[in-house]
Amino acid sequence: MKPFVAPSFSYVPLEETLEIIPKKKKLFIGIPKETSFDENRVPLSPEAVAVLSNNGHEIIVESNAGEGAFYFDNDYSEAGARIAYSKSEVYNASTIIKAAPISEEEINLLQANQVVLSPIHIPFLKASMIEQLIKKKIIAIAFESIRDDSGNYPIVRSMSEIAGNSAILTAAQYLSNQHQGKGILLGGISGVPSAKVVIIGAGVVGEFATRAALGLGASVTIFDNSIYRLMRLQNNIGRRCSTSVLDPVTLGEELATADIAVGALKPLHGITPMVVSEAMVGNMKAGSVIIDVSIDRGGCFETSRATTHQKPTFRHQDVIHYCVPNIASGVSRTASRAISNVLMPLINQSSDFGGMETLIEMKSGIRNGVYLYKGCVTKASIAKRFDLKYTDLDLLLATQR
């Protein structure tokens, strides 16, 4: 049967519902000088400040904030920033951007309803600090948890690339006589074999440590329990490498003949698995070098303990240990530019959307970094750690629409 259409049938057009894009919002951004120990980075470079300033944003920089990265007040003032000589003046800004986590002293300077972009170190957080931030209804974003459109963590990746490259360059220095090493050239020369490097972990740190070691001519062996990561590393490097799963016997044999060992394992549930025992370290050659990149989450080596940039090494069982948690701060200018390259477009984008709050609503990658939102804890791990009420950010934003 043919379909029957009554004469009274008609199409009634409906109005199209269009999203109303908010007007651009000019931001007031404050960059304080970091007082945390061993922190030399600054979150925005003068080049990034110039771009933001040209887009109409107001930026206030505390005097000597970029000194650790060899960026000076004159660089920032010429880029369009205002230099402040009082920390409290900087904290009058509506958006605070930091290269180090918020300290207890800085919490007292924060204003109600501010937006704070900074890293977060959960092991050093205190319940009293979180409670104060909740009372001030701060929107706190951990920038290392921000995801890009491809689902990656751009700042974490950049810092991992720096750590991987720096680990090999640092180890090469400590093999030399100038640092009481054995006097070994990492790449060797004609007729003299190159140094042997063992890398534990095939993530981004391990990949870039492998690239640096191979580029300098060293012999490299990589360990990881993920066959996928080992295959991906070899594909990314574009050449065959010696690889193995984390078998204690094989690992111990390789470490016994290694000149350099790099610990670069990813943490499990916030703690790095310890895979190298003290006995394995005792079997290593005298004068060999351990670089434990994972020390900020416990370390891969049983003999590791955290050191500083001022006193970066110690000897244990005649093996040199380098266990600085914040390796990227040792190359602060490069690290600052890497952070700045991520944050500057993000800030400009938030202006286009009418402010950071709207950007948080629009971008799931930004929401992933939010751990406090206007008096609510929006990160389950933090709420569980400090026995606080957890509020899902997506549900919270849905109720405000």
Image (cartoon, rainbow, N blue to C red):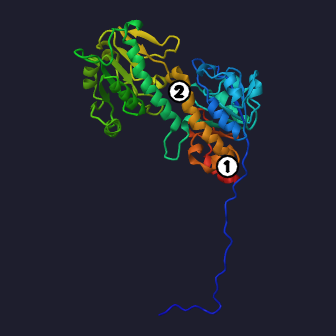
What residue is at 33 percent from the left and 14 percent from the top?
185
- Give whichever of 37, 331 is nearer the camera: 331
Q: Is residue 200 left or right of residue 117?
A: left
What is the x, y in percent for residue 130?
66, 31
Q: Amino acid at mark 2?
A: Thr
Question: Where is residue 345 shown, x and y percent of the image?
Answer: 61, 41
Is residue 389 in sight in this rendering? no
Q: Give the CA separation, mark 2 to mark 1.
A: 30 Å
Q: Residue 57 in the image: x percent, y percent? A: 72, 38
**Residue ID at (66%, 69%):** 16
Query: Splitting the image into 4 quarters, where does residue 321 fall?
Result: top left
Which residue carries the number 2 mark?
Answer: 334
Callout 1 amino acid: Phe
Q: Across the whole image, how many numbered discs are drawn on residues?
A: 2
Observer-nearest of 371 and 26: 26
Could you tell which of marks 2 and 1 lies nearer the N-terminus?
Answer: 2
Name the residue located 73 percent from the left edge and 51 percent from the top edge: 23
> How many other residues sit within 10 Å of disc 1, few (<14), some (14-19) or many (≥20)?
many
Looking at the image, which residue sits at the far front?
78
Name which quarter of the figure residue 9 lies in: bottom right
Instruction: Look at the numbered disc 2 and give the secondary structure of its residue.
Output: helix
Give the answer, above or below, for where 283 lies relative to 358: above
Q: Nearer the viewer, residue 315 or 31?
A: 31
Do the residues bearing badges 2 and 1 touch, measured as CB atoms within 8 Å? no
* Res. 56 in view: yes
Q: Residues within 10 Å of mark 2 (few under 14, many from 20)?
A: some
Q: Which mark is residue 353?
A: 1
* Number of the label disc, if any, that sits on residue 330: none
Q: Secondary structure at mark 1?
A: loop
Q: Quadrant of residue 131?
A: top right
